[in-house]
Amino acid sequence: MSLDSFFAWFFGWFPLSPYELGGTFETGFIFGLVALGAYLTFRILDFPDLTVEGSFPLGAAVAASLMVGLGMNPWLATVCAAIVGFGAGFVTALLNVQFKILHILAGILVAIALYSINLRIMGGPNKPLLRVDTVFDTLDFVPLPGIWLNPIFLGLVIVAVLAAVNWFLNTGNGISMRAAGANPAMAEANGINVGRQRLMGVGLANALTALAGALFAQIFGAADAYMGIGVIIVGLASVIVGMSLIPSRTILIATIACVIGAILYRAAVALALNADQLGLQASDVQLVTAIIVALALIAQYSGSSFGRSRRKGAKSEGDKSEGDKK
């Protein structure tokens, strides 16, 4: 069987077309960056951060404005977007650390402010990427169709970011950050500056989110001030789904699980929207997201409850055996 025949057979019964499958991997890898950011804040730092609702479109706005307005190289514009995203997260953490504003409220304040800032940056509610080269256009020399080239490139980006995140979390600063999130009081007692770790960690998480926003805008051809709506739910859904399916105590497996969760989440959304018998439309994507997150949480809770009941039963049997021996 030739390769073309295999693809014709596979997509003949697979519920997604080649373009839908490629798009699922594209968006899955992009939101994998958001999931890694959510993992840093929610799991590592225990810092519920809502800034991502603003830093995702911030990255898109900065990259689009630099490429369209200044003609900047798309790679450099993407890096600048990540740096500006770091600044947004840094401000959120600063409000919490320096001025003792509740972390959730600090994130909401910065996200609200970023909405106006994004409008200022773009000079309007959106910025089309017309007649400008994106990072994906610079890959035209690779002899592959865009439907497969873009997911492969984004997959390589995810691998590089995963390697960098895991390397960092196993350095001295990374271990200090993990300690600051796990037990702030004990970390302070051991000389770790918990506030500085929060500033760095929340900044890095929003840098990853802004990077995702910049890539998202370039692959879909425009930046929009409203594209951050629901991003925090997508990030959390990816983390919850991934870590429910692949529970692990190691950083490497946990971060990989977050990325896999992002891909599975996007695949579940695509399958749900393409299931004609469900009667769902593109506007129902937030409803599908809520259902997926709820099911993942229920499965996670049920699994943990089952595990606790088994341990309790085993302990009772052990106590009973000890009593019989006596």
Image: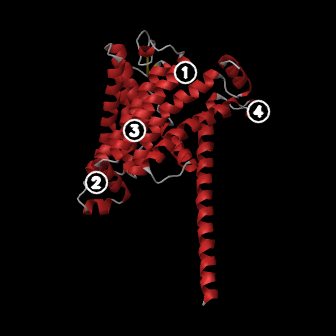
Of pointers 3 and 1, the one earlier in the residue sequence = 1
Of pointers 3 and 4, the one earlier in the residue sequence = 3
Q: Residue furthest bottom?
A: 326
Which amino acid type is shown beneath numbered disc 4? Gln
Q: Nearer the viewer, mark 2 or mark 3?
A: 3
Which amino acid type is shown beneath numbered disc 1? Trp
Q: Nearer the viewer, mark 2 or mark 1?
A: 1
Which residue occupies 23% across, 59% down?
Answer: 191
Which residue occupies 44% across, 16% down?
Answer: 139
Cα gap from disc 2 to disc 3, whole angstroms:
24 Å
Indicate the secondary structure of the residue bearing disc 2.
helix
* The N terminus - image quarter: top right
Indicate the secondary structure of the residue bearing disc 3.
helix
Instruction: Look at mark 2 in the image and give the residue it sits on.
Output: 194
* The C terminus - image quarter: bottom right
Cα gap from disc 2 to disc 4, whole angstroms:
52 Å
Q: Nearer the viewer, mark 3 or mark 4?
A: 3
Cα gap from disc 3 to disc 4, whole angstroms:
41 Å
Instruction: Characterize the local packing of mark 1: few (<14), some (14-19) or many (20 or more) Cα atoms within 10 angstroms.
Output: some
Is 248 or 17 nearer to us in this picture? Answer: 248
Check if mark 2's residue and mark 1's residue have beta carbons within 8 Å. Answer: no
Instruction: Look at mark 3 in the image and give the residue it sits on.
Output: 163
Q: In this image, 103 relative to 275: left or right? A: left
Q: Residue furthest right?
A: 277
Indicate the secondary structure of the residue bearing disc 4.
helix
Position above or below: 234 against 245: above
Q: In this image, 162 relative to 241: left or right? A: left
Instruction: Characterize the local packing of mark 3: few (<14), some (14-19) or many (20 or more) Cα atoms within 10 angstroms.
Output: few
Check if mark 2's residue and mark 4's residue have beta carbons within 8 Å. Answer: no
Identify the disc placed on residue 277: 4
